Image: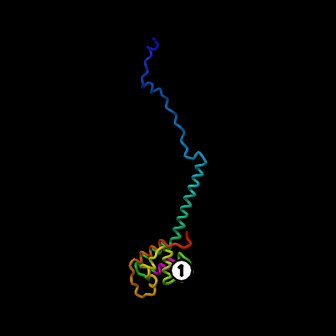
Amino acid sequence: MSETAAQTPLTLVDLVDQLVPPTEPPPVSMLPQTGGWVVLAVIAGMLVLWVVWRWRVRYLANAYRRAALDGLQDAGSNPDEVARLLRRTALAAFSRKEVASLSGATWLDFLDRTGGGTSFSKGAGRAVADAPYRPDGTPAEGLEDIAADWVRHHRRDDAP
């Protein structure tokens, strides 16, 4: 007992001072540890490239639509200008053989069939049929909206 009594008791501070600091762990690698992650990254990269490629192809294919919409803003409700822009747009989208010979009611039916409505044959779009042959160029109310809708939404009969 005398030995233990001679020893001074350890305090909490003395015990903390005796602690050994832990060793620093090695840095965590940022590389994937399995091949599955590499395969997934390659597939994701290819998917992103495919989406960008499809977007670019579609953007370039619709350049004529953007040009026609810009022209429609300049033309306003002038039926003669709108008729020219619709004809030019149809020639860009469809074959010349299919579009060039159309006039009058057949032209309006074509616009309705490809645009998905009856705005041309039964609405304000009728002004487009005879506008190139009229000298007065009287503005037609709503024609610009109908034409812009056709430019945005026309589809080929054989298109998906």
Q: Nearer the viewer, residue 51 or 109?
A: 109
Residue 101 seen in the current view: yes
Q: Report how many numbered discs are placed on residues in the image.
A: 1
Instruction: For label 1, count other residues whose C-alpha is less than 10 Å away and answer few (under 14), some (14-19) or many (20+).
Output: some
Residue beneath the point at 54% across and 82% down: 100
> Secondary structure under badge 1?
helix
* Span colored in magenta: 83-90
Classified by dominant secondary structure, the portion drawn in magenta counts as helix
Q: Is residue 111 above or below residue 136?
A: above
Residue beneath the point at 44% across and 79% down: 122
Q: Nearer the viewer, residue 73 or 23?
A: 73
Q: Nearer the viewer, residue 108 or 150?
A: 108
Residue beneath the point at 53% across and 80% down: 99
Q: Is residue 85 covered in magenta?
A: yes
Farthest right residue in view:
35
Residue 22 placed where, x, y %?
50, 33
Residue 142 placed where, x, y %?
40, 77
Q: Is residue 157 above or below residue 41?
A: below
Name the residue beneath numbered marker 1.
99
Name the side, left or right, on which 43 lies relative to 80: right
